[in-house]
Image (cartoon, helix red, strand yellow):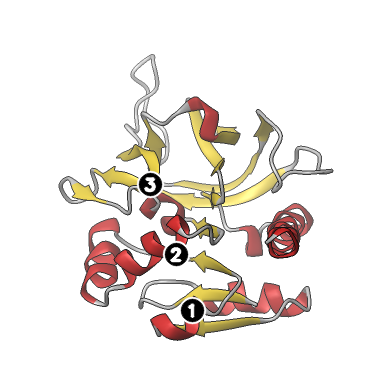
Amino acid sequence: MIGIVDYGMGNLFSVSKALERMEVPYLISDNKEQLAHAEALILPGVGAFRDAMKLLNETGLASFITEQVQKGKPILGICLGMQLLFEESEENGLHQGLGLLKGRAVHFSGKDQDGSSYKVPHMGWNKLNFHQQSPLTEALTEDHVYFVHSYYIAQHDQDTLVASADYFGEVPAVVGKGRVFGMQFHPEKSGDLGIKLLRNYTRYVKMTEVLK
């Protein structure tokens, strides 16, 4: 069973509906005891980094997530949820994240190398470029997914970069290290490739359960 972390700022409906279509058992909860019984976690997120971390800290879910990951439980962060996995964000001041991956969320500059303006947020379909093998991208081919974000991860470890998109520079789109994974885009809104990426995560979860 997949535990979807409900901390008040996630797009729970679309993620849960995607799991339903794949016939993957799940629960949506803010209860740490219930989530502890899940085989893996999904951390969704829509909104501001600062507000999300405030809620995660106030509910004790931040320390809970860290402890569960340290015990070997897989986690997938989606959109803002991916950024929360990293060390910090510059959104509305500098704020600490969960620190499960190295990197910082920074705002798109809105200016290209020639000084011309470009649109922020990065919104719409963009193609993924695969960089290394990962359980998430196994047997998949590069295609387009759907992004909506004004901040992106910079100063990250290259060995965590699974796939990127090009938006006036390299934008980390899929990350992974150990059993910690993230997708900057919305896989549940990204057509066939998005569903396949989610399915690969659930298959990875099943595999890790068998290996225990």
Residue 171 in the image: state x and y as whole percent.
50, 34
Judge by depth and name the residue closer to the eye, 148 or 208: 208
| Of callouts 3 and 1, the N-terminal one | 1
**Which residue in the protein does label 2 denote?**
68
Q: CA distance from mark 3 to mark 1?
A: 30 Å
Q: On the rendered image, what quadrant is the C terminus found in?
A: bottom right
**Which residue in the protein does label 3 denote?**
150
Q: CA distance from mark 1 to mark 2?
A: 9 Å
Give residue 51's quadrant in the image: bottom left
Q: On the rendered image, what quadrant is the N terminus found in?
A: bottom right
Q: From the viewer's perspective, is 98 left or right of 137? A: left
Identity of the amino acid at label 2? Gln
Q: Residue at x 51, y 36 (%)?
A: 172
Identity of the amino acid at label 3? Ser
Q: CA distance from mark 3 to mark 2?
A: 29 Å
| Of callouts 1 and 2, the N-terminal one | 1
Q: Nearer the viewer, mark 3 or mark 1?
A: 1
Give residue 207's quadrant in the image: bottom right
Q: Residue at x 69, y 81 (%)?
A: 25
| Of callouts 3 and 2, the N-terminal one | 2
Task: Characterize the local packing of mark 1: few (<14), some (14-19) or many (20 or more) Cα atoms within 10 angstroms.
Answer: many
Q: From the viewer's perspective, is 208 left or right of 9? A: right
**Which residue in the protein does label 1 denote?**
35
Q: Is residue 28 visible?
A: yes
Residue 199 in the image: state x and y as whole percent.
75, 61
Please identify the residue farthest to the front as the structure is shown: 212
Label 2 near label 1: C-beta < 8 Å? yes
Identity of the amino acid at label 1? Leu
Please identify the residue farthest to the right as the structure is shown: 139
| Label 3 SS | loop
Q: Residue at x 57, y 83 (%)?
A: 27
